[in-house]
Image (cartoon, rainbow, N blue to C red):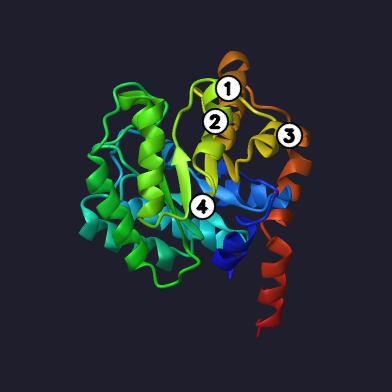
Amino acid sequence: MKDERMFSMIRAKEPILAPGVYDALTAKIVEAQGFDAVYMTGYGTSASMFGFPDIGLLTMTEMADNAARIADAVEIPVIADADTGYGNPVNVVRTVRQYEKAGVAAIQIEDQTWPKRCGHMAGKSVIDAGEMIGKIRAAVDARKNSKLLIIARTDAIATHGFDHAIERGHMYAEAGADVLFIEAPVNMEQLEKIPGLLAPSPILLNLAPRTPNLSLDQIRSMGFAIAIYPGVCLAAVIAGCTEEVKRIKDTGKQREFGDWLQAFLDLNNFLGVNYYNDLEQKYKD
């Protein structure tokens, strides 16, 4: 079971590195490179599926459906963004049940008000800590498998300061969160303090624009249990697509087919075309 593997990995000393993915294909690419987990990014899901910014425009079912497609495409565990849980604690119960049906190994819920914003955007606000505690308790009670990880995120650094965010982390751990996520630390001093201040809870680190970019050695030495890279696939695809369509616009012609041919064949093999060809022959009249 993927959730059981994630449950075991979180207790190991080596950090889990989870590149951000937004669809089944990017998840398969990450898996093929040997990573132990993927992170379904809400920002990437919103941008890729609908062309929307990450400002709370997607529904729970749209997010859970995408999580299901990603989880079905890979054998490694999926950590899935579930925004604020999409309502009050009763809504969180349904959210956790839908995500669990989708096959994810960990669910991330944050304490922003709705509509939320990307954690590295300006203009965020957070709900009362007591309200978030109710959501965490609901999430813990709603899961059918105790090894499904509940990740509690606080965005309170931006609204109430670092010390208050740490206080919330302790409260969320007491409420039953399996992993804590202190969003958007802004300097190395904050990063170095977080794991120790919240020990023994496992801590997730989000390597996104407002947070210093760390190496694996730094992540390990500071004591973070999980590192996510939400924008890595989305940024690469945007850059690649922009370059190729600009080529057509500037020159009136795409790259020569010979340049694409091997990549096309490799992609078909990567997607399992031989497996489906064999199935076709097996059941052919």
Residue 262 drawn above or below residue 252: below
Residue 29 rendering spot, x and y as whole percentages:
66, 47
Cα separation between marks 4 and 3: 22 Å
Residue 132 visible? The answer is yes
Of 209 and 270, nearer the camera is 209
Picture residue at 62% right of the left edge, 62% below the top: 8
Q: Counting residues from the N terminus, which is met first, the one under dot 1 or under dot 2?
A: 1
Does dot 1 land on a helix, a strand or a loop?
helix
Q: Counting residues from the N terminus, which is met first, the one under dot 4 or under dot 3?
A: 4
Residue 202 drawn above or below residue 235: below
Residue 181 rendering spot, x and y as whole percentages:
46, 41
Cα separation between marks 2 and 3: 16 Å
> Mark 2 — residue?
193
> Mark 1 — residue?
188
Cα separation between marks 1 and 2: 9 Å
Please tell me whether mark 2 or mark 3 is closer to you in this view. 2
Instruction: Give the numbered dot on residue 217.
Output: 3
Cα separation between marks 1 and 3: 14 Å
Q: Counting residues from the N terminus, which is met first, the one under dot 2 or under dot 3?
A: 2
> Mark 4 — residue?
79
Residue 51 visible? The answer is no
Picture residue at 57% right of the left edge, 24% below the top: 245
